[in-house]
Structure formats: C-alpha cells, structure tokens
Image (spheres, grey):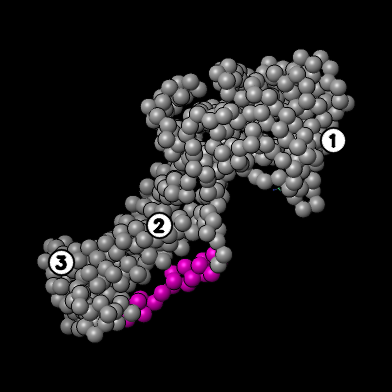
Amino acid sequence: MTITGAPPRIEEATQAPILQLSVTDLSLRFGEATVLDGLDLTLGPVGCTMIMGPNGAGKSLLLKLLHGLIKPTSGRIDWSGYSAADVTARQAMVFQKPVLLRRSVAANLDFVLRSRGKDRDRCHALLDHVGLTHKADQPARLLSGGEAQRLALARALATDPEVLLLDEPTASLDPASVLAIERIVSSARDRGVRIVFVTHDIGQARRMADDVVFLHRGRVAEHAPAAAFFPEPRCQAARDYLNGKIVV
Amino acid sequence: MHSIGESIALAFQLVLTGSADLIEIVGLSLQVSLSATGFALLIGLPLGALVAISRFPGRNVVLAVMNALMGLPPVVVGLLVYLQLSRSGPLGFLGLLYTPTAMIIAQTILIAPIVAALSRQILEDLHCEYAEQFRSLCLNPWQSMEALLWDARFSLLTVALAGFGRAVAEVGAVIIVGGNIDHLTRVMTTSIALETSKGDLALALAIGMVLLTIALTVNAAVQMMRTTAARQAYV
Ligand SMILES: Nc1ncnc2c1ncn2[C@@H]1O[C@H](COP(=O)(O)OP(=O)(O)OP(=O)(O)O)[C@@H](O)[C@H]1O
Ligand SMILES: [Mg+2]
C-alpha cells in the first residue's frame, strides 16, 4: 500500500550541505502541453536567487520540482546527490496560496514544531520574528492576506530549512507588509539560508537579488548576477519584461 | 385503555414527574447508544482517515463496500450478532446474549460503517486541500491523519451525531440481541414497540417525547457548535 504524501523519515544530523544545485535538461509536460522544455540551471551555495518570468512561464512548477513535490517528465535535478525525499525535508516552501490549518495562529506553528521534532518553546520567538504575537490566539484562517503570508513564512522558518523556496510571498500585500517580509527573508539569507524567490515585483527583485533567473518559453532565458541583469538584461524577453511590455 | 387525549396527558405527567421506569429506560438507552457511538468513532474515524489518505489497488472496492455497509438493516445486524452470541454460537461462552453489552456490540457494528464512510468523504476533501503542504512539511501518515482528524473536528461532530441518531432510534438490532427484558435490556425504542402493542399508549408516548427531545437537543447543540466554529473559519 502506498500512502499519498508518504514522507521520508527526517534525518536530523549535520550532513554535507545540500547545495550546489544543478538542473540539467529538465522537462515537464502535461499531455500535449509543455511547461518546461529542457531547462538547465546551476545554483551556488549562498545568496538569494530571484526567479522572474511572465505568467504561466512555469515558475511555481519549477519551485515544486526543486522542492521534490512533483516529478519531472525528464531531466535531472541534483541537490548534491541527495534523494528527493531528503531534499524536501531540508527545504521549506511558502506556496503562492498558503494553506493554513483550521486552528489558531500559534497552534499552526506549534503543529509544525511538534511534528518536525523541534523545540516547541520557539513558537513565541517565531511569532515575534514575523510580527504576529498579537494574533497568536486568533483563528489562522481569519488572518489578512499579508498576515497569512507572514505566518506561512514563520512556519517555513520553523523547520530550520537550508533552502527557503518562496513563491510570490508578497503578491497583493501593502508596501509595509512587503518590506516586513523582505526583512525577514533577508535576515534568513544573512544567517546562511539559501533563498530562491519567485516574484513579479521588479523593485523587489532589485532590492533582494544576488542573482536573477529569467524563465521564458520553458527554459532559463537568462541567469545573471543582479549587478549585470538590472542595468540591461542580455535577452530580449527579459528586456521587454523589465520595460513593461507583454512577454509571450 | 385510555383515549388518545388521556394518554397524552398521562404521558406529560410521566415525563414531568420523572417516573422511575421512564428514567431507567432512558438511562439505559443513552448508556447503550452513547457507548456504541463512542466505539464506532474509535473504529470508524481512524479507518476513514486511513482510507482518505491512502491510494492502493482495489480502493474503489473498499469504498463501495464501506458505502454499502452504511445501509445495513438493523435486524440483519441483530441476527448476525445473535448467531455469534447465542449459547450454541462461537462466542456463546461469553454469556453476553440479552445483556446491554450485546446491544452495544450490535449498535457499534451498525454505525461504525456510517462513521467510517462519512468521515472518509470529509477527510478526503480536506486532504485534497492540505496534501501538498503536508508533503512539503514531510509529515508521516500518522501525523497527517491526526492533523486531518483534528482540523475536521467540527464536521466530524455531525458524523458522530448521525451515528448516535441512528443508534438511539433503531429497534431491530437491540430487540433481537437484548430481548427487551424489563429492568435489564429495555431501551426507549423497544419499550415503545412493546407498550404500543400492549395498548399502553401513555408510556409509549412519554418515551417518544423524550426520544424526540433528545434528538432535537443534540442536533441543536451540534448546530450551535458548528456555527461558532464557522465564525472562526474552522469548518
Ligand atoms: N496540473 C496541470 N495540468 C496542466 N497544466 C498545468 C498544470 N499545472 C500547471 N499547468 C500549466 O503550467 C503553466 C505554468 O504554471 P505555473 O503555475 O508554474 O506558472 P507561473 O510561472 O507560476 O505563473 P504565475 O506567474 O501566474 O504564478 C501554466 O500555463 C499552467 O496552466
Ligand atoms: Mg506561480
């Protein structure tokens, strides 16, 4: 019998680092529709990588592939040789639409700390870190969009990930909430957490990026250090995207 | 024999004065059906949760069987349990026939499939929503089941209520394995059947009123809890 969502046992040990990541010839198809088409990507051990690209470019699916949640149609994703199960356990992902449990804010965090065998006393510190202490006892499902994203981020951080995958965590948030989330992510990055961040917000990409991956037509159209990408991307699609033209 | 009007008046009197017979019968009824509901939840909820999060060959057959068992006729369950517990049956040595325990067993068998099938549906829907997040968090199946059961707690209350309602209102199974023995295995439904056939409509009506009140009260309580839960977006 296989159980859907059957996870690996989490191995808590100081193991060899999970990065470098190398993705080779990655393809993902749904029947006739090709989402990713021979994508290659290499990520180094530190920093914040911003992933950009038009709607439907496959950013969310790429993140799920990297996280080990879905299997590619073909190609390889190699996190320093670790199995998909190990990879999932050592990363955390904040989904584009975070799913919060039907319990209080604090109980949502406590659940993750407990099931992952972490110190449950960290709950308050984590809530404080994301500025939700005053909402601790409120039902999580009544949080505003920005608060829900912050709770999802706290939940991801609670697992002490080596890699944090963020899928548009600030879409439709007010400027103060955007900055609050960016500050939390930056502090994680400064602690050595590897960040992979999907965004449509060009200003945010400029603020956060160490390097930028631009996805277009199922491939990496450009992967460049921020300092090189933002003044003038090399590929036409990225130039059009930054200039606000519709990219198809 | 009284007229209907006199019977109703007498019934009210019995209820209001709390006649000893009535209290005994209602008490045993609640004891049997609440116990059966408790056991059915213990069996049915984990089963429902396990099937909800599992994929295995033949799963559709299991679902079909679970759904079919929901409609078990009480008399058939009563008969099957009787055959097991009767003196010549395989479990006859336990001496359980015509005891409240036998009635609890029969009602548990009757409603455990209801709990399993209804909770499976609820938990599977919830799992659809949670599955990806759970996989990302690397939860094991037991952690997933536990989380689903807790998060569906208010919907599962309705399942428990459906089970209790079925148990407390059924007569076929308890009359066969309980025997409707005065002061021993006489519950609300079997007394109503007996008293009506004897023509003592007053007691039958009095018990009927209590049964109805219990059903309505429990329903209202569950409804209230669900409304409160919905306000907190917990449903
Ligand atoms: N299960 C599926 N079956 C078929 N097509 C799918 C499926 N999931 C996603 N797609 C398609 O794959 C493409 C990429 O989806 P994805 O969610 O990765 O886009 P995205 O780059 O994250 O877009 P956005 O910027 O809008 O979030 C979309 O065109 C989508 O319709
Ligand atoms: Mg997306």
Q: Which mark is residue B24?
A: 3
- Asked whether A122 falls inside the magenta stretch, the response is no
Query: Which subunit holds the residue at mark 3?
Result: B
Q: Residue at x 74, y 43 (%)?
A: A75
Dot 2 corresponds to which residue? Answer: B45
Q: Residues at marks 1 and 2, common chain? A: no
In which quadrant of the rendered image does the C terminus of chain A lie?
Answer: top right
Residue B161, can we see it?
Answer: no
- How far is mark 2 from mark 3, CA to CA? 31 Å
Name the residue type under label 3: Glu
Residue A72, can we see it?
Answer: yes
Residue B103 at x, y percent in the picture: 26, 71
Q: Residue at x 61, y 41 (%)?
A: A84
Q: Quadrant of residue A195?
A: top right
Write down the region rendered in magenta: B59-79
Name the residue type under label 1: Val
Residue A177 at x, y percent in the picture: 58, 21
Relative placement, left or right, of A107 versus A246 is: left
Residue B144 at x, y percent in the picture: 47, 47
Query: Which subunit holds the residue at mark 2?
Result: B
Q: Residue at x 65, y 45 (%)?
A: A70
